[in-house]
Amino acid sequence: MAIRNVLIVDDSKTELLHLTEMLQKMGFSVRTADNAEEAFRRLADEKPDLILMDVVMPGQNGFQLTRTISRNPEFAEVPIIICSSKNQETDRVWGLRQGAKDYITKPVDMAQLKAKISALK
């Protein structure tokens, strides 16, 4: 599956802007959401080809949202890459157990992100 449309879920406006610019430079179409509720609205509007998911957010956190999305038959095939400042191995393992396909730590390196996206294709 070709990845063209990316949904970024992050409560930091700075991080949303940074990741959006990075992904657009790589040629992706980007939409954003700053919490779980908005992410579900975006999913309902248009299913993305990839989700970049922050972990630490108010309300439902990224681990919970990843689990919810990956267990929903309508969205289960949409790959999720967790993109978090949580850099412990236990966080990475937990994220993958929730249904994420990969895990990347902030600050995000453009080359590393591009490699992780390419590995999903």
Image (cartoon, rainbow, N blue to C red):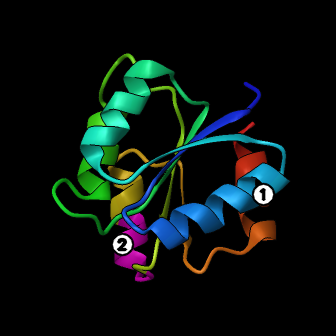
Q: Position of residue 3 (x, y in %)?
A: 72, 33
Q: Amino acid at mark 1?
A: Lys
Give the mark count: 2
**Quadrant of the snapshot with the N terminus:** top right
Magenta residues, start to end: 87-93
Crowding around mark 1 (Cα neighbors within 10 Å: few <14, some 14 to 19, many 20+) is few
Residue shown at 73% from the left, 53% from the top: 23
Q: Position of residue 60 (x, y in %)?
A: 19, 53
**Residue under numbered circle 2:** 91
Q: Tell me if 30 is positioned left or right of 35 in this view.
A: right
**Residue under numbered circle 1:** 114
Query: Quick check: 38 above or below 18?
Result: above
In the image shown, does 24 or 121 lie closer to the viewer?
A: 24
In the image shown, does 12 or 2 lie closer to the viewer?
A: 12
Farthest-out residue, left: 59
Dot placed on the residue nearer the N-terminal end, 1 or 2? 2
